[in-house]
Amino acid sequence: MQPDLIPNVPPQRVHRLYFSITAKFWISHLLSICWVTFSIYISLPWLEDLSQIITFPGALFVITGIAYVPGYMNAFLIASLLFDRQPAFKNIHPADPVTLLIAAHNEEDTILNTLRYVSRQDYDGEMTIIVINNNSSDRTDDEVLRAEKELGINVLVLHEKIPGKFNALNHGLVHVTTPLVITLDADTLLHRSAVRFLVARLESSPPEVCAVAGSMLVRNSRETIWTRIQEWDYFLGIASIKRLQGLYQGTLVAQGAFSLYRTECIREIGGWPDAIGEDIVLTWRLLQKKWKVYFEPLAVAFTDAPTKLKEFVIQRARWARGMIEGLREIKPWHQPQLYTKYLTGINLIMPYLDFTYTFCWIPGLILACFGYFWIVGPLTILVLPLTLISFGLLYSYQKYAVFRKLHLSIRKNFLGFILFILIYQLIMSPVSVWGYLQEFFGSKRIW
């Protein structure tokens, strides 16, 4: 997906048929229940056969984890996406003062380009840029000074010697004087209208909305086969989950790479927490305050995905640990709103799903290669159509509702897509299990 700096104004849309969020929520659940009921009915022979090998409780445990629950979640996702209609902007050219916080640790190779894209924003309001140098040992400061001279921008450079992104952001927060603050990673490139659309979404939202997550896409998708695969994860997988959560006003991660917050809300909850997944815990604390978190698909930013398998494993294991941190601190049943109870509650069963996939489905796939269809067989393929349908819906949405409006082009990456469908989960689930185990045993944090 190529960054393009040509702005475009989304047309105002009129919807004749209106469903409340509550109606969308329960209708989507009803359709999901119908699908699972059908799945259970046709899987009874499979359940009976597997019960003869590992007992009925064992068979039910396995099949629920690899078929019933994933099928339910995919059906709920598809139904919800069909209902999703992003409200029109009330003001597409907001001018509220906003501060950008950029935490940087040894970012001499990327910070100049990041600031170059910031300087080209078509935002009408005043933007204050703060770079927090988090104990860098390279020429990050020099590159920021170079950016000021070459780009004609003013940047406040702060220094935080204590390692940890949360320390850097909290240091920067002390110096924020604007009502709105954006966090931006030092290797993230913004579409020309990214800040404008992010602020416009917040201005067009109810006052209880405290944050808006931007849309993250992969910039370096041509570097390795791993970045090619991750391109589709960001473009389809992560984006679909963000849209689902945004529809129900409970985006679970206003990611630190590019998100907008009300400054007073961040200060009220004590800033960014000391956590490996500081943005996850931060977002859940905001939701616990009865505030809402939205998602804006048109606020596009491009990030560098890990280029090597080892780097990918470290990143995704860290994400899994961050989810467990959030669950430990804020239990889903302590969330005040129905939708956020449900959305955060889904995370409670993710370790179970990753466990059954890693230790049941993958071995079952190996057995199937030798003609033993005890676990992986024809019936497990029923989950695949739902996955392809959901990806097809999101691909169309991304292409026509986002990329076309932003004058972006979708790169041809057929090999990456095939590998994403076939092997991505084979890697992700074991990596997530590894992350859960790291958190359980209190392993050393790796940023």
Image (cartoon, rainbow, N blue to C red):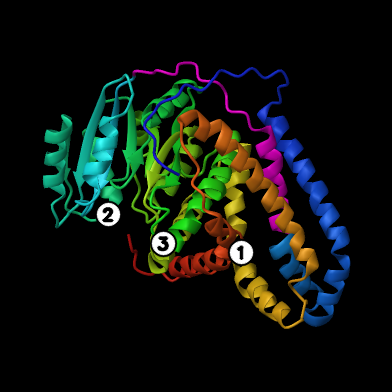
Tag 2 or tag 1, which sits nearer the N-term?
Answer: 2
Please state, as top left, top right, bottom left or bottom right, where the N terminus lies in the image.
top left
Q: Secondary structure at mark 1?
A: helix
Residue 324 visible to an observer of this rendering:
no
Q: Position of residue 68 (x, y in %)?
A: 75, 59
Give the residue number, with chain letter if any, for mark 1. Answer: 422
> Disc 3 and disc 1: Cα gap in Å?
17 Å
Q: Position of residue 435 (x, y in %)?
A: 46, 66
- Left or right, 405 with respect to 175, comes to right
Q: Position of residue 77 (x, y in %)?
A: 66, 45
Of 10 and 361, the residue lying toward us? 10
Q: Residues within 10 Å of mark 1 (few under 14, many from 20)?
A: few
Residue 165 visible to an observer of this rendering:
yes
Is 405 above or below relative to 172?
Answer: above
The disc labelled 1 sits on which kind of residue?
Leu
Give the residue number, with chain letter if any, for mark 3. Answer: 224
The disc labelled 2 sits on which kind of residue?
Gly
Q: Which residues are magenta?
A: 68-95
Residue 164 is labelled as: 2
Q: Secondary structure at mark 3?
A: loop
Q: Position of residue 70 (x, y in %)?
A: 69, 57
The outermost residue toward the front is 412
